[in-house]
Image (cartoon, rainbow, N blue to C red):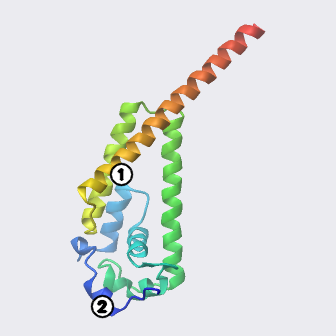
Amino acid sequence: MARHFGQEDVNKYKKFKKVDGAAYRKVNQFLRRRTYVTAREWAIARLCTDFRTRNGAEMTFIGKHLPDLVPFMKEPYTAQAVNQARNSFKKKVTKSGATFFYGAMCGFFTQDELDDLLFEASEVARFLLEVERSSLEIDEEIEIEERISDVMRSVGEAAAKLLRSREEEENTGKGESG
C-alpha cells in the first residue's frame, strides 16, 4: 500500500529547527561557503528523502507544505520546482564527486591529503545533519566512514599503480626509439 502524507506529518516534522528564524540568504551563504548546493537544493533534497514513497518523493506534498516544513523557505513550490531543485542537487553532487575522484585518481593528492579531505568533508556533512536534526547512529557513521576510506585507499593505490605503469611505458618507449 502506498504511503500518503498529510497535515499530521507536517505538524510532527522536526528538522531544520536549528535554523528557525534564519533568513534564506543567511542559510544560503553558510552552505555556499562549505558546499556547492543552495539552501533550496539542500532543503528539498532532505525533504525528498524524508517524504519518499515506493513510487518516489511526494513532490506535490513537499511543494505545497514547504514553508511549514522548512523555516527559511517562505513560499510554496510547484511539484515541478521541487523536482528541478532535487535534480539540481543530484547533478551538483555527481559533478562534485567526479571532480573529487579525478583529483584522487590522477595522483594530485597524496593518501594523507585524501584522508584529510575526507575528514573535512565528513565534518561538514555531520554538521549539516546536526543542523537539520538528522543523525546517524555511531555504528552507521563508523561503517560509512570505513567504506569510504576503503574505497579512497583503493582509488589512491590504483591511481599510483596506473601512473607508475604509464611512466614505465613512456620510459620504455623512449629507450626503444632513441
Residue placed under numbered mark 2 in the picture: 8
**Residue shown at the point (67%, 18%) measured from the top left:** 170
* Amino acid of disc 1: Ile
* Amino acid of disc 2: Glu
- Residue 123 in view here: no
Instruction: Give the image location of residue 148, x and y in percent.
Output: 40, 46
Q: Which mark is residue 144?
A: 1
Decide: is 90 above or below 55. above
Decide: is 58 above or below 41. below
For the C terminus, which image quadrant? top right
Secondary structure beneath disc 1? helix
Secondary structure beneath disc 2? helix
Q: Quadrant of residue 118?
A: top left
- Which residue occupies the foreground of this view, 160 or 84? 160
Instruction: Give the image location of residue 91, x and y in percent.
Output: 54, 61
Q: Mark 1, residues whose alpha carbon is within 10 Å: few (<14), some, or many (≥20)?
A: some
Q: Mark 2, residues whose alpha carbon is within 10 Å: few (<14), some, or many (≥20)?
A: few
* Horizontal arrangement in the rendering, residue 110 relative to residue 130 (left or right): right
Instruction: Give the image location of residue 143, x and y in percent.
Output: 33, 50
Mark toward the start of the polypeptide (2 vs 1): 2
CA–CA distance between discs 2 and 1? 32 Å
Instruction: Give the image location of residue 164, x and y in percent.
Output: 57, 22
* Horizontal arrangement in the rendering, residue 131 relative to residue 66 (left or right): left
* Horizontal arrangement in the rendering, residue 175 relative to residue 25 (left or right): right
Q: Nearer the viewer, mark 2 or mark 1?
A: 1
Q: Which mark is residue 55?
A: none
Decide: is 55 above or below 174. below
